[in-house]
Amino acid sequence: MKKKIATCLLALSLTGVLYADSGTYGTIVDINDAAKTILVETTYGQRINVKILPNTEIDMEDCGIFGTDKQGTFSDLQVGTFIKAKTFYGYGYDANQQQNPQQIQNATAREIEIECKKRAY
């Protein structure tokens, strides 16, 4: 019984490596409408090409009337907008590989959050 539990735990931990889930914070620097991707320059200087799927949630915080939240679409994403995205790196992503900051990485977005309130600058 202990071996079965250990095997299940090992399988679950390996699944986490294959589909690493992370948060991406940065500014949109380019939008490809045909491919439904956005290029994000993160707060760490990396560039990530983020694929937007039809079921990706785009939450617009404080963007509605009287500061209410609303659901956005791909067309609401604009160059220069700061976003917080829940992304995952699927097939071919190696969490242990040293990443070059100049290299553009690919990710897929599960959720994107935009804040419309005034910024510091």
Image (cartoon, rainbow, N blue to C red):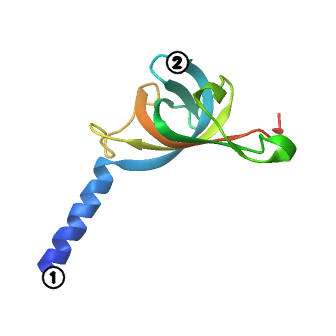
The residue under the point 16% across, 69% down is: 7
Side (left or right) of 106 relative to 63: left
Distance from Cα at disc 1 to Cα at disc 2 = 51 Å
The quadrant where residue 73 appears: top right
Q: What element carries label 2?
A: loop
- Residue reaching furthest to the bottom: 1
The x and y percentages for residue 92 are 27, 36
Nearer the viewer's eye, disc 1 or disc 2? 2
At x 37%, y 49%, the residue is 20
Give the image location of residue 106, x and y in percent: 40, 31
Task: Report the quarter where the N terminus lies.
Answer: bottom left
User: Which residue has dot 2 on it?
Assistant: 33
* Horizontal relation, residue 67 to residue 2: left or right: right
- Residue positioned 84% across, 38% down in the render: 118
79 left or right of 106 in image: right
User: What residue is drawn where x is 63% and y is 31%?
Assistant: 27
User: Percent x, y for residue 91?
Assistant: 27, 39
Q: Nearer the viewer, residue 113 or 103?
A: 113
Contact (CB < 8 A) between labels 1 and 2? no
User: In the depicted view, which residue is nearer to us: 102 or 74?
Assistant: 74
Q: Residues within 10 Å of mark 1 (few under 14, many from 20)?
A: few
Q: Which mark is residue 101?
A: none
The amino acid sitting under disc 2 is Asp
Extreme-right residue of the structure? 66
Q: Look at the picture and state if 59 lies above or below 4.
A: above
Q: Which residue is under mark 1?
A: 2
What is the three-letter code of the residue carrying label 1? Lys
Horizontal side, residue 62 vs residue 114: left or right: right
Q: Position of residue 87 (x, y in %)?
A: 47, 43
Between 115 and 18, the one nearer to me in the picture? 115
- Frontmost residue, 96 versus 5: 5
Residue 121 placement: quadrant: top right
